[in-house]
Image (cartoon, rainbow, N blue to C red):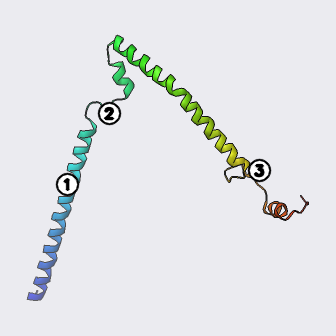
């Protein structure tokens, strides 16, 4: 190999080594971030379901917590029922107004819609 070929080989080797070091550094940083995220996710109170925490309490405390949660749920129930009724009313209104989410059988065919717009009394 002549001097020029050696210089090209050296440049390619240096570029490859820089690429390898950068890749290894990026992989190390990613692994570190994953390790920190999993350690944070395993902190007490984050991974345990609420009912598991409640069940771990003494019976008197557990019963009190359940009573309070039930009372809160019953207080919120009218709000949920009102929201459900409003949602049903909105859905019914959009269907009555010809919303595109209605069943396909209820939508007019293009020729029926054209006849309705132009006042033609013919219907197939």
Q: Nearer the viewer, residue 116 or 43?
A: 116
Q: Nearer the viewer, residue 34 or 94?
A: 94
Image quadrant in which you'd find residue 11: bottom left
Q: Tell me the residue that label 1 is attached to.
A: 29
Image quadrant in which you'd find residue 15: bottom left
Residue density around tag 1, few if under 14, some if 14–19, many if 20 or more, within 10 Å: few
Residue density around tag 2, few if under 14, some if 14–19, many if 20 or more, within 10 Å: few
Residue at 8% x, 88% y: name it. 3
Q: In the rendering, at what x and y percent does residue 49 appear?
A: 37, 29
Mark 1 and mark 3 in contact? Answer it, CB < 8 Å. Answer: no
* Residue positioned most to the left: 3
Disc ID at residue 47: 2
Work out whether mark 1 precedes mark 2 in sequence or the reverse, and give the earlier one. 1
Q: Nearer the viewer, residue 7 or 35?
A: 35
Whether residue 124 can be seen here:
no
Residue at 64% x, 39% y: name it. 88
75 shown above or below 83: above
Q: In the rendering, at what x and y percent does residue 73 appear?
A: 48, 25
- Image quadrant in which the N terminus is located: bottom left
Disc ID at residue 106: 3
């Amino acid at each position: 190999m002549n001097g020029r070929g050696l210089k090209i080989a050296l440049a390619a080797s240096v570029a490859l080594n820089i690429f390898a070091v950068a890749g290894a550094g990026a992989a190390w940083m990613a692994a570190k971030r994953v390790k920190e995220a999993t350690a944070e996710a395993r902190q007490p109170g984050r991974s345990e379901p609420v009912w598991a925490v409640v069940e771990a309490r003494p019976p008197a405390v557990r019963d009190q917590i359940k009573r309070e949660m039930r009372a809160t749920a019953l207080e919120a129930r009218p709000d949920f029922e009102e929201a459900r009724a409003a949602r049903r009313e909105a859905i019914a209104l959009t269907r009555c107004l010809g919303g595109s989410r209605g069943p396909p059988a209820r939508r007019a065919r293009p020729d029926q819609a054209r006849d309705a717009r132009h006042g033609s009394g013919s219907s197939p």
